[in-house]
Each structure stands twice: as structure tokens, then as C-alpha cells.
Amino acid sequence: MGGNSKQSQRTKNNVRPSSSGRSAELLSNVKLESGLVSIAGGKVLPALFPTLTVATIDQEISPEFQICIKKLNKKDPITKTKGLQEMLETINNSKVDDVITILPSWAHFYKILAIDPDRKVREYTQLCHSSVVRACGRRLAPRLRQLVPAWLQARHDEHGPAQAHARTSLASTFPDAKLPEVLAFCKTEVMTHFLDNLIGTGEASISKKADSPEDKEQQVTRLISSSLLGLEYFVRQLPAQHDAWLWAQLSALLHAAAFWKLAAHSSPRIRAGWAGAVGRLVQRFHSTFGDQFGAKTFRVLLERTQDTELLVVAPLWTCLLLYTHSVQDWCEHLENKELLLKRMLELLENGGRGDAGLLRAALLPLLPRLPRDLLTKHFYEQFFDAIFVGLEKKNILSSKSERQSWLSGLAEGLRHLARQDDDFVLEVVTSVHRAWLRHVLAPRSDQRLMHELIKCSASNMAACVKFWHQQSEDKYDQLIRNFWQNVNFTLLSQIETLSDNTSDTASATAGHVLLVQTLKTSLLNEPKKQRSIKFEMDRDEVAPEPATPEWSPAPDPAAALRFRRDLDDAVQRLVARYFELVGSSSHCEAVLAALATLLQEWEGGVRAAGAAALYRALLRPRLPASRAALLLAFRLLPHMDAPERDRVFDSFDQLTGDCEEWCIEYSAAAAWCSTSAARFLRSPARTPALLRAPHLLTACLAHEILISKEAISEIIDVINKTLADPDSPELELRSRMGAQLATTLPQDYHDQNFSRLLVNLFHLNVLVPLGDGRLSADTWHEVRSSWQDGIGALVPAARKIIYKEINDYIIDTLFTEIRPLEAGRVESITSLCPLVLSKDASPPELRDVTEFSRALLGGAGGAARTCAVRHDCIQGNFNCPFRDDPYMKTIIDEADGEATEPDESDLTVYVNKCVFRSLYLKAILLRETEDESGDAQRWGSLLLRDDYFLLEFCQLLHDHMVLCTLDEAYAFSPLHEIVGAARRTTDAVVLSTVRGTERPARRRVLAGLARRAAACGYYWAKARRYFELNVDPDDLEAENPFDTSNLDLEKMAEIVTGNGYFHSLQASLRGREGAGAGAAGEAAGAEGEGAGAEGWARVLYLVMVRSVYAAHGDEPGVLDARFLQELARCDSGCRLDVIIDLYYRHNHVMLYDRDIRSASWAHVLSNAAVCECLRAQLVGRGRAASAAVWDFLCITLCSLLSSLQLSKAHWGSTKYALLARAVLRLYVAAARAVDTAGGVVGDTAGGVTGDEVAGAGAARAAEWRDVFAPDLHANLFALLTHVLDSHHAPVKSTHVSTVEELMLCTKHMDWNLLPKEQQVNTFALSRLVRACCGGLAGPHRAHQHLAACVLELLVEPLVLEDVGKLSMWSESSDEEKEQHERPQLSLEYFHEDFVQLTDAVEAALAPYTVGEAVCGAAGCGAAGMSARERGACLGWLLMADSLHRQCRVAKGDLKHYYIHIYKDKEYGVPLLEGSLRLLPEELLAHALGNKPLPPQYAAHFHGTAPRSLRRPPADELARLACACVRAAVCGAGCGAARAWRSAAPQRAARLFDAVLAAYVTPLAVRDQLLAVHERANEIENAQIQVLWSSQEVSCVYRVEGRGVELRVQLARDHPVGAPRVTPPPPGSPGANTHWISVYLAYQDGTVLSALRQWTRAAGSRVQRAAVCYICYCRLQPAAGTLPRAACRQCKNKFHKECLRKWFSTSNKSNCPLCRASF
């Protein structure tokens, strides 16, 4: 492509490119011998390529191994490493036979890869090698001679992991004595390998592979050093019988000058390897080596002793030591004796040049081999002086091991010198020891280092002395005397030279004490056996010498006695001098501390006669200010008699403050052996000090009580006063003291004051919860354990008093003040109750637990229970026709009027009791203790055997069911926060308690619940069902006690009065939680065990029969013999013929067209039961309603709705709510049946065919719409308008029940089914909209949601009415249009109420700025706004949702009118700003960049929140706000949103952009593209493609046989951003596309509609276009353009391309038709 065509081919690493011809030519001239490949390339012709050095790959090798072997031949280290890794894995996963096949290739590669420059390659090579030899085992033998040389070399690789793997594999393959045999077998190959590497051509072969001089040098160093070390190892391990052969082989090496040059090589590793190899040769061949190479070797060694490299020093001096011990007459080779001594002293002065072990390992063993004329007094003085100089080196002082090794060498040097017979020995040893003492006792800035030096030195000194004690010569006795003289002299001299610096004095005295302590310890303790870690790979190494010197003697009693006597004498001298120093020195605190320590360990340090005098003269004046003086005084007490001790303690009475506390602390420790100390502690004067310091009180109470009873009582009084104030600053201190007293005082001290202390400690655990900053966690737990132990130690009578006080305190704390109870606080209190009743882990007394619990657990909640029963009666959960219960009596008495609701205090008291009962019983029943066998046992297994606790546990389940009902009943109310929190708490607690009890206990509970359910019904039945559903099925009874198959209905009159049976039936087929109601009843019925739909219908049928009996059983002639016959006949199929027949004979049994208040409670209940049974006929599985039932159902609906309409003024009464719920549910079921294409309204009995059933269903559906629907809708709309008009009245649970069912009814209502006259007048759309607006503006969410449902119902009628208005107005003449303005559209009905709600919302959201803060009211129960403000926001959002829905439904011109109204009324900006301020806080945090995008809110933007009054979503406002944002941006308010965004502040714009990009744009784009994708086939002659990733649509419209393409790409910020439209080429049909952007961006248009309009416009334009009379086409065949070039004469148009061709071919510029000139 324009470059140099002759450029050479690029190749990797700049090598020549491969050429088959060149390779063939070279191969023909090169002779290769197989099996002779070596790294020493001098003996074999060099390979042409690296691949040619590979042994021939055996065809038997598996393909996996072949791939790996090929990778090993690559130059890249990464490729080779991967190949080795793959080979390792393949070896581990292959069979042994497969691994054996690669041995020839591996033997070749191993010696190459073992010295690879890359250390990772070498490491994985050794790993692979280890796996290969482990897999092959004995079959490795034929390849040993190829492998062992490189193996030994790799054993000394400089890379640690590679070296470790090689050593491990070698040791594991050839254990114990096998390795020498293997080396003897491979000796020739090994020596050849090492000699080639050291003096052969190994370096040359490496240089050919090296890429740079640095790499070459590193590889050579690695090769030579590992070869030297390998040679050293080979020489050491080769058996002795091969000595002659080995010496012959080594001759060439030793005569090679290159070998001796290695001693001065620049690499320390090579120099160290050379020294090690030479040392091993000298050790093996002794005089043979010395005779031939001794002089040369010693000269080189002596010259190299100046080497300072740490790696070289140890091998070099070790080699020198081996030389002196192995070569006889080595001194003859010593030409410069002074040089050797000089180098030894230099090594010592430099601290062994980093290796302190050289002092013991090399230099000290070298001393005996030196000539006698060198070992003079001067030499030894210089020798030890050099040791002291070396001791100060950094490498010695900074390392503990180095320091210990150096000092051990010093001691061993003294021992060696002491054994010499020279005259100067005593003088030098004594002088060195004195210097040693001065050196280690000298002041240092690092105290820790000083102490370590003293301890280590004293231990070694003591070892020397003990060794000397074992010797019998006189000089050793003199050495011992000199030793102690040195100690005494050094210590006393240092005391004389102490400065006035306090820190120096403290340091010196501490050193003195540590020295004598270490000497004493070294005398008494055996020397510790030195332990070391030995790894597997070190098994073949020479065992290290023991760290403990061989001269450490066993202790001798006589020597030990003398040692102790000398040490005691030294200590007495030191103590006496210290006392003199105390009397004369101004800084004696450190001296006093040292004296106290010495006197504690040496009782003979002071004579008894002088102890009291010392105290009076030296210590007593210093007591108030010196703790050390006080401690020393107590150390002197054992040396005094009783009167002297009494006088000393009398002097302590004058002490105060800290000094008094010190006295108490020391006295408590000495009180057991001193009556004087006990008398001092029992003095009342000690009480204030004990109150200040809890640890002193602990000390006085630890073993026995050392203080008086009066003092204890006074202390308890002070503690009780402090505990009464939890905010006291001394709370922590006094709490710990009280806890100590509660656990340590015996029964003699258990008085009333002690009992009050226990109660106050319990109060403290309650008032200050765990984690409170006023009390630490440790103290809180200590307090809890203390009062538990204290209560358990009381006698029974005192314990009962404690129980009563704790009971009264709990009741006063939790129930005196009526306020919402905190579950966490209650749980913390109840968790303490089991601790009150049990001591340690023992089980409690049943009588104590019963009495304690009976006082705490009491009944409450009459008003709350009445409300719960009323709700369950309305919801159909309970059938209660009689006044058999106090709660039912209240309900029936109030049934005609407004129901009395419990106030907040009633509910609070009841739920508080329920929560406390649940948490208390959980704590009691699940408490675990240990039985006699030590197994854990829960209290519940014991307590639930008692009738009282069984009843309480059943009552707990009963109360929980009441709470569940209250939670459902008050979900609409602000009181729901109280009930809901309590229900959630009890739900979790009850479940854990039920499942935590043992099986026998659960069965007893179930039996108790069954008895109460059968006897009483109500919530006992629910509790029984709840218990059954939440325990193991094995705990249930084998048979169902509520089987209805064998029920004798003829005896109904006898069983109808009892609630137990019927309530149990209803509970058994309700929700899983026992509180299911409403629509959930159907599904719950199907979930009943073995019941299904048939069981559900059967229960409703029996309840209906019972209700009829209860309502009309006392009326003569109603329930006669005919009724009983019909009942028996219809029972098997639960048919309703019995009720239909009863109605036709006695019309009054149904409340048709009557005021409900005139009927009795039982009568209303029976009608509700009939409606429920009729409903079951429609929704039952596989059941069809007969014609009679269908007619009766329709009549019942119309009549009862009429009755409800007549009684609507009392729609809040219990009777009305009960009947309204049943009737409205029946209406919903009937409407669903009608809507299901004939559905279930046909008669399928008697052989009627399916077509006949469908025909009958269609006929009855038509009858429903024409006959019954108008009347039904009239009554329903009357109820709706009445309820909406009463939006200012308070809402109760009875109202909510009716509103809920009306909301469901609106989904099956049609405004068009109303009678025409009512559509115009009573229920005109404008009137209904105003009623709905009033409901939306109301304060309660029940009216607001009902209004929203009605508006949703009226959307289509409103749109159609507006279409009619506009149609009539548009058909009028222009004059009429000028006289009459445009008619008012339905969207304008909302304006006045919407403006009022907008003002209210703006006032509520005024504190929140868009983009800077969001309202905390995004949740339903948020505290950010008041209830009224939240209600205003909810109504406003629901009204906005209705407006947006109506705009979406409108089409055509009406939609543009709606958009105009929307803009003219300025709805867009308030809606957008308000909804943005109501978004969840996480969205704002994401917009500000603080949190990631929360995905859980994506569903909120799909639509409005689900409408539920009983279970409103917690984020109801947030859902509506998110939906409002999307509607305001994507609908009629798109233009307003675009304008607002352009002028919005930065933070507001960031929030808008974040929400738009994350949620709105994806949904809007998806809707647009999905509509195009699904309806693309509606556009003819168009090929449409949707490009989802780029948000683009491509439309190719084919006209006149050509394709015209239009591309529309939606913006990334769609719909705010304008789309990008790519039109066809200019001149093409459809090229004018400017209107598409305007249509999509500003007129709420869709892409599908735009494409449809564009194709129509393009097609019509082509059809309108003239034909070009040159090509006779409308579209130019090549360019596809329309004719645009017009002739000015004949006005015909031509294609420009055709004209151009016409002019060029005709050579004229005339018109083809008229011939006029263009």
C-alpha cells in the first residue's frame, strides 16, 4: 500500500526467518550424534536451531505430553513456564506408563531447563522433575546418569523454591544410605559435568544463549557457584572406597589455574562455594592434599581472610579451621604469623562481619592450633578487647540471637583461657571479667538492650562459675573469689559514681537488681535444652552443634551452697550500701524500689534487729510521698516483732489519699499473716478509701472479709444512692463495687440493705441497656451476674420479697405511662426475668416461676378485642348471630349506628400487654438449663406441664390472632403504626417460641387449644389453626376433627347455638396466618388441608344454614318440615334450592328493598351468608349455577343493592358494612362470570351440550346488560357518589370495608350501562368528576383511592364525550364558532381542584429544593410531613395520574386539544418539580454521585402504585411520584419538561438527568421501539428494522420498484432531546423530513405514527409527480430522484440525470418534447 515492497520479513527476536532450503543445506553438512547433547558444547557440534537439540519425540508419547514438550523448546520464558505447568498437571493426572514414555525427552530437557535464566522456569522444572521421579520410581534407573549431575547442581540453586524442591525430591527418592550408592553409580558423569562447568566449556555454551553481557555474567555465576557447591556435596557423600578414583579425577581441577582464580572471583557466591569445596577436599584428603597444594592453599586462604562479604566470611574461616586441623605441620606454610593474628582481631572487632557464630565455630577452635609463641598475655588481652569492641557493633546489638551467640563465645573464651597453664591466666581472666561487668552495667539509652545484655551476660558468668566450682585445682578457687570480688567491687563502685540524674539512678539500680536476680536464677534453674526446627529437606545435613556448651555442669549441692552464700553476701553488701544511699541521696525513689525488690527475694538482706530502726529513720519520713518507701516498709515487717508491727500500723493511720490506698492494698495482701494488718483494715477510717477504689474492696473480700460489718453497710448505702441516679458520674465505679459485694458477702450480711442493693442492681440493668455509654459492657455483664448470684443465695422468704419488688418495678416501668412500647426495651427486660428465677444453670422452682409470672401477666384490651371481633364478623371470618359473648353483645347493640372505635390509649395498652406477654413467655419457655445428666433442657418442657403456663401460652396465641386482625382492620389508620409494629414483633416471637418448644409440649398446647376452640370458638379457633400450620406435621392429630361429611343437618337446631364448631370450620379454611379475610378467603379455602374448592363451598353452605336457623328458627311456620326435607335433599350437593324455595314461600327472609336498620342482626347476617354462598356457586371449581340460581342471584343483587341504596345514610354502621361487603363481592363475581364469554352461567346438567351452554350463557349475558345492569349501576353509582360526597366525615374500619369492595366493583362497571336519563342528570360525567375531585381533595386515603378508581372508570366516557362536543362544534358554521367558544372539555373539570391541591402540595414541599433535598415523606409513614400534608400529596398525585391517563387515551385532534390545555394551564412544571421532590432519597444520592444506581426503583416508573387500603405499600408516594415523573416527561408535559430542564439550576438538572437516563428514557425508548416492532407489518410496502442497541429505526419504503430509506434515531435523553432524522437523498420522495423531529419532540408523537405518515406522504408525492418523458419513469432508475428540472416552454419536468445524458448523446441542449432551448 505505497510502502517499500522490498522490506524484509519481520521475525521474532530479530533472528533470521525460517527457510526450508537453507535448513536442508545446513543439515546436509552437519553430522549429529544422538545422545551426546550437553550444555558444555565444546564436544558436540552446535545445533542448527534450538529445536534440533530436542531428542526425538517418541511416537508413544501421548498428545498432551507432546504439546507440553514442544512448548519447552520455546525461547520465551512465559511459554516455557506454561508448558511446565501443563506438564505438571498432565503428569499428576496420567497413568504411570504414560509418564515413563516421556523419560528420554525429560532427561534431555531437564539439564537444560535446570540452568535456565528465568527462575520461575527453574522452579517449575524442579516441580515437574519431582513428579516424574515420584511416578516412575525404580524405572528411573536407566536415566540416572543423565539426571543426577544436573540434579545435584540444582540442589544448590540460588532461587530458594527451586533449591527446596530439588533437595526434597533428592532426599525422598534416595533416602538414608541409598544416595551414596547412587553417587558411586553415576560418579563419572557427575565429575565430568562439574569439571566441564568449572574448567571446561560450560561458560562458552552459556555465552551463546545469553542476550546481553549482564545476563551472561549472571548465568555464569549461577553455573559456577552451583557446581562448586554440588562438588562439595558430592565429595562429602561419595563413599570412602572411591578416594583414589576421586583424587585422580580432581587432579585436573586442582592443577587448573582457572580453579584457583575462583578464590578471587567478583561474585561472593562463587568465592563462598570455592572455600566450601576446598575445605571439604582438605577434610577428606588430609596430608595428601597438604603435601601437594598446602602452601598454595594456605597462602590463598590467608590472603582472602580480609574478605568482608557476609556470604564468604563463614566458609572461608571454616575452611581455614579445617585446614589447620587436617594438615599436619601446617605452621610450616605460615609465612606471616602477625598477619593471621591481625586478621583474627579484625574479624572480632567487626563483630564477625555479620556472623556472630564465627567466634565459637571458627576462632575459638582455632586458638588451640596456633603456635605457642603467639599465645602471649598481650595476645589474649588484645583478643578479648577485640571481642568487647565487636560487642558494640550494630549487627550484634540489634539481634538477640547474635548477641547471645557472641556473649556465649566470650564466656567460652574465658573458660578456654582458664584451662591454660600460663602464669598470666588468673590476671587476664579476672581483668576480662571485670571489664565484662563494667561493659554490661554501663548506662545505655536503650534500657531494654541494657537488660538483655545483663541477663545474657549474668547467665554465662554463672555458668563459668559453676564450671569452676566443679574443678579441683587451686587456681579455680582463686578465680571464684576473684569473680565475687569483681561483682562487689563493680556494683559498689558504680553506686559511688551515681550522678544526681534520677533516670540514671533508676537505670543503674535496675541493672544491679537484674544482675543479682539473674545470677540467682541461673544457680537454681537447669540449663534449658535448646530446640530447633529441622525441615525435611535438611535431613541429610550435618546436625548443628548444641547451643548449650558442653562444659555446662550439673548442679552440685556443695557448689550451689557456696554459690548462694557468696551471692547472699554480695546482696547484703549491696542492700547496706543502698540504705546508706537512701539516707544521703535526694533522689531515693529508685533506690527504695530496688531495695524492696531485693528484700522480697532475699530474706537475709536485713538483720531483724535493725528493721524497725531503719523504718523509723529512713522510711517513715518518706511515706506520704513515696510508694516505694511504703512497699519497702511492708518488706521489713517480717523482720519485726509484734509490738514493732503494731507501732508501724499505728503510724499508717496518719496517712491519707493515695498513700492510704497503698496501705490498704499492701495490708490486704499481708493480713492473713498479720493481726496488725487485720486490725488496721477493720478500722472505720478505711471506709472512704474503700469507696474510692473498688480494687481495694475486692482485695479485702477476696479470701475472707477483712473489713467490719459497719463499714460494709455504710458502703452499700453509698452504692444504693449512686445506683438510684443512672446519670451519676460515679455510676461505673459504684456499679462494680456493688457487683462485688453482691457476689462475695456471706449470708450473715444478707439484711434489708443487701436486698435493696440487689434490686437496685437489677434496676440498673433495666435503666442502662447494654451498649449505653454510661456503663461499659464488662461492667453491665458483671452487674447482671452479681444480682443473679445474690438472689440465688438468699433464703426463700427474702427471695419472695425480692420477686415482688422486681414485679412492681417492671409493671411501673412498662405500663404505668401509656405510650407506644419499645420492643427492644421490653425484650431486654424480659430477658432478665429468667435470671431472677434461676441460680447459675440450675432449673427453677415451679412455684417460684408461677408466682412471679402470675403477678406480671394480666388481661386487658376490651375495646380492642371488640373491634377485632367486629372486623372479623364483617369480613366473614366469624359467623356470630348470638349475644353469647360480651364483645358480641356490644357489637350487636351498636350495629345500627356508628361503630365505637378504640382510641389510641386502648390500643396501646392492649398491644403493650401482648408484646410483653410474648417476649416474657419466650424468655421463660426457651431458657435452657442443665439437667442431672448435664444435658441442656429448656424450661418449657417443665413449665408447660403446669396448667397455668399451658393456659398462658394458649392465651399468647389467642392474643396474637387478635393482633393479626387488628393489624388488618387498622391498616388504613394512623393507629396502624402501633398495631403493626406490635404484630410484627409478636409474629416473630410466637413463631420462634412455638418452634422452639419440644414435641410433647407442643402436643399439650395443641390439645389445650383444641379444647378451647371447641368450647368457645372465636380466636381460639384461629389460634388452633395457626398452631397447626406452624408446627411439624407429626405433632398433629391423625384425623381431622372438623370433618363435615357426616354432619346431621336435622340436628342443626341443636348445634346452631355453639360457636366452637362453626368458627373452627371457618378458621380451618382461612389464611395461613389464621387472619385471612376478603378475597384471600378463596385462595385460602383451596389451601385448606384436603378441602379445596369443595371444602370451601361446603363450609359456606353450613354457615348459611346456621345463619338462617339463627334468624328464623323462632318464627312459626318458616323452618317447617318442608324446609327440613329440602335441606336433606340439597345437602349432598350444597345446592341453594332450599333457600330459593324458602324465599318464594316466605319473601321476608330476604331483605329486599328494605331499610337495613329495620332488620335484626341475625337477619342481616343470614342475608350476607346467602350472598357468600351464591358467590361460591360462581367461583367454585367445576361447578355451574343453574337457571334458578342465576335468576335468584340477579334478583338478590338488584334487591339488596336497592336496600343498601336506601340505607346509604347509615353506611358506617356494622350491619351496613356486613351486608355491603357480601353483596358487592357477589356483584364482582357475577360481573366476572358475565365477562367470561358466557362463562359459568349455563346449566351443564341433564345432558345439555356445550353449544347449548354457550348459547344460554350469551343469552343471560345479554339479559344481564339489558335488564339488570342499568338498575345495578344506578344503585352502585348512587353509593359511590354518596361515599365520595362524605369525604369530610371521619373514616372508621366499617367504612373502609365498604370502600374496599366499591373499589373492586369499579373494575367491572360501565358508565354507559346507566339509564340515559341518569347519564344526563343524576350521574352526568361533570358531576361525577366533581365528586371525585372532592374525594381526592379529602383528608383520607380511602376516599382518594376510591375517587381514583372512579376516574379510571370514567376515562373512556369522558374522552368520547369530548370527541362528541368537538365534533358538533367543528360542524357548526364559522359564524356560530365566533359566537360560541370552544365547549369545555373534561380535562378542564379538574382545574379548580387541581390548583388548590397544587398550592397545598407546594406549601408542604416548600422546605425542600429540587435537586438538593427530597421529602422524607416518600414512605407512607414518614415523619417528614404531617398526615394532612401526606394526604394532599397523595390526592394530588392521584389526580395527576388521572389527567395523564386521559391524555394518553385521547387520539387525533382531541389529543392536541388536551396538550394545549395542559400547556395553557401550566400543569407541567408544578407536576415535575413536585414529583422530583417526592422521589426516594436513594435516587437523589445517586444523582449527587454518593451511591450507585438503585435498581429496585425501576418498577416504580412502569405505572401507578397498587391501590390497597388494608395493605398499602410502604413507598406509595414514591411509586406515584416516579410514575408522575415519567408521565410528565413522556406525555403532554414533554415540552414543559424540556423548557424547565434548560433553565433549571445545576443540582436540579443533575437529578433530572440522572432519573431520565436511568429510568425514564429506557422505558420511553422501549415503548416506542416495541410499538414499531410489533406493528411494523401494518405499514405496506415498507421494510422496517429496529436497532435496539442504537435506539434507531430504519424504514425502507419501496415505491416504483425502488427503496427510499428513512432512519430515525431517538436521543439519549429521549423524549426531552430531539431525535436525529436521517432523510433520503435530496430529490428523493420523502426527503422533506423536518416535520418528523417537530412531531416527535413537541407534539407527543410516536415513531410508528411518524413512519406511517412519512410513507403515505412519500407515496402520494410519487403518485402526484409527473413522468419524465426521457426515461418514462417518475423515479430516476439510477438515482431514484423525482423529476425536478422543468422546461420553461412546455412546463414538463425531467430528471437531471436524464437531461444530462440526453444533452451528451444528442449534442444539443433542447427540450426533448418542445425542442425549446434549456
Image (cartoon, rainbow, N blue to C red):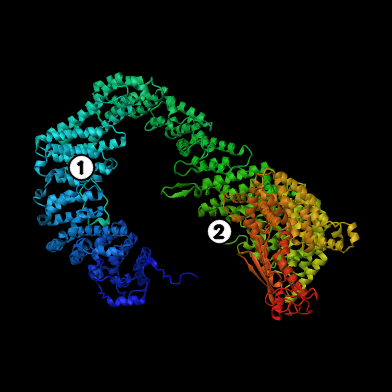
Residue 570, image quadrant: top left
Q: Residues within 10 Å of mark 1 (few under 14, many from 20)?
A: some
Which one is in front, 187 or 1400? Answer: 187
Can residue 1302 be seen here? The reply is no
Measured as percent of width and height from the top left, residue 203 is found at: 25, 62
Which one is in front, 1177 or 437? Answer: 437
Apparent side of residue 379 relative to residue 1288 in the rendered image (left or right): left
What residue sits right under mark 2 in the picture? 1036
Q: Nearer the viewer, mark 1 or mark 2?
A: 1
Measured as percent of width and height from the top left, residue 1616 is found at: 68, 57
* Disc 1 residue type (three-letter): Glu
Apparent side of residue 258 relative to residue 845 in the rendered image (left or right): left
Figure check: 577 above or below 167: above
* Residue 20, numbered circle: none
Can residue 871 be seen here? The reply is yes
Measured as percent of width and height from the top left, residue 1656 is found at: 75, 71
Measured as percent of width and height from the top left, residue 1407 is found at: 68, 43
* Disc 2 residue type (three-letter): Leu
Which one is in front, 136 or 114? Answer: 114
Q: Quadrant of the C terminus?
A: bottom right
Figure check: 510 above or below 1616: above
Label pair 1/2, CB-CB below 8 angstroms: no
* Residue 346, numbered circle: 1
* Secondary structure state at the residue bearing disc 2: loop
